[in-house]
Amino acid sequence: MLRLVLPLLVIAVIVLVIVRPGPIVRMLRGKPRPALEEDPREILKRRYAAGEIDEDEYFRRMSGLSQDW
């Protein structure tokens, strides 16, 4: 019984990896992980730290994000 189930299990795993590649396969192929949606506040902090926006722009945009629309 085990001699029949084990090869079928191995084949099923191989088919799943080919049809729907997971994070391990993506990592082995060298593809980057899909980016998670970033928090807009974190993006603003990073842009301010990098000097892309000045202090006034940073605070203006942060206050806009904190308002309830």
Image (cartoon, rainbow, N blue to C red):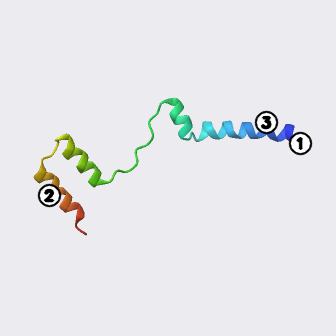
Badge 3 marks a residue whose secondary structure is helix
Task: Assign the C terminus to one quadrant of the image.
Answer: bottom left
Q: Are marks 1 and 3 in contact (CB under 8 Å)?
A: no
The vertical placement of 28 against 56, above or below, is above
Q: Are marks 3 and 2 in contact (CB under 8 Å)?
A: no
Residue that sits furthest to the right in the current view: 1
Task: Assign the N terminus to one quadrant of the image.
Answer: top right
Q: Which residue is mark 3?
A: 7
Question: In the rendered view, does 24 fall on the left or right side of 3?
Answer: left
Q: Where is residue 19 shown, x and y percent of the image?
A: 60, 39
Q: Which residue is mark 1?
A: 1
Quadrant hosting residue 13: top right
Q: Compare marks 1 and 2 and give the one earlier in the sequence.
A: 1
Question: In the rendered view, does 42 fall on the left or right side of 17?
Answer: left
Badge 2 marks a residue whose secondary structure is helix
Question: In the rendered view, does 24 fall on the left or right side of 54?
Answer: right
Q: Where is residue 47 shown, x and y percent of the image?
A: 22, 45
Q: Compare marks 3 and 2 and give the one earlier in the sequence.
A: 3
Q: Amino acid at mark 2?
A: Arg
Badge 1 marks a residue whose secondary structure is loop
Q: Which residue is mark 2?
A: 60
Q: Amino acid at mark 3?
A: Pro
Q: Where is residue 22 shown, x and y percent of the image?
A: 56, 41
Residue that sits furthest to the left in the current view: 56
Q: Are marks 1 and 2 in contact (CB under 8 Å)?
A: no
Instruction: Identify which residue, 60 or 55, lies in the foreground.
Output: 55
- Marks 1 and 2, how far apart at CA: 69 Å
Picture residue at 32% right of the left edge, 54% below the top: 39
- Marks 3 and 2, how far apart at CA: 62 Å
